[in-house]
Image (cartoon, grey):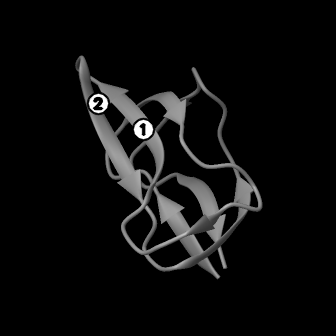
Amino acid sequence: MAQVLAHITGTVWKIEKQVGDSVAEGDVIVILESMKMEMPIESPKAGTVKEIKVAEGQSVVEGAVVAIVD
């Protein structure tokens, strides 16, 4: 299993993938908004989204786990 981490502090703008979705390495799972910029968070490996740990509109800090991919 791989943890998908926020690389910046920001607000969850959009969740692109849902639990059960297949992803390739580099697929966007969540988009964060920080300082009016959209920053995609990508899957570190190919697999299946097992868990989404954030909700749209939620604030996250750098290093927070936003999803789990297996």
Q: Nearer the viewer, residue 41 or 25?
A: 25
| CB within 8 Å, label 2 to label 1 | yes
Residue 15: image quadrant is: top right
Q: Secondary structure at mark 1?
A: strand
From the top left corner, tell me how far across and down residue 55 is, in percent: 66, 32
Q: Residue at x 60, y 49 (%)?
A: 17
Instruction: Indicate left or right for 50 with 6 as reference.
Output: right
Mark 2 vs 1, N-terminal side? 1
The amino acid sitting under disc 1 is Ile
Instruction: Name the residue carrying label 1.
Output: 31
Q: Secondary structure at mark 2?
A: strand
From the top left corner, tell me how far across and down residue 33 is, in percent: 35, 27
From the top left corner, tell me how far across and down residue 66 is, in percent: 57, 51
Q: Nearer the viewer, residue 34 or 39?
A: 39
Q: Nearer the viewer, residue 36 or 24?
A: 24
- In space, the residues marked 2 and 1 are separated at their CA atoms by 6 Å
Q: Is residue 60 above or below residue 13?
A: below
The amino acid sitting under disc 2 is Glu
Q: Quadrant of the N terminus?
A: bottom right
Instruction: Indicate left or right for 12 with 1 as reference.
Output: left
Label 2 crowd bin: few (<14), some (14–19), many (20+), radius 10 Å? some
Q: Residue at x 33, y 52 (%)?
A: 7
Instruction: Name the residue carrying label 2.
Output: 38
Q: Residue at x 65, y 40 (%)?
A: 54
Give the total number of marks visible in the rendering.
Answer: 2
**Label number found at residue 13:** none
Instruction: Indicate left or right for 53 with 44 as reference.
Output: right
From the top left corner, tell me how far across and down residue 58 is, in percent: 59, 26
Q: Is residue 52 above or below residue 55?
A: below
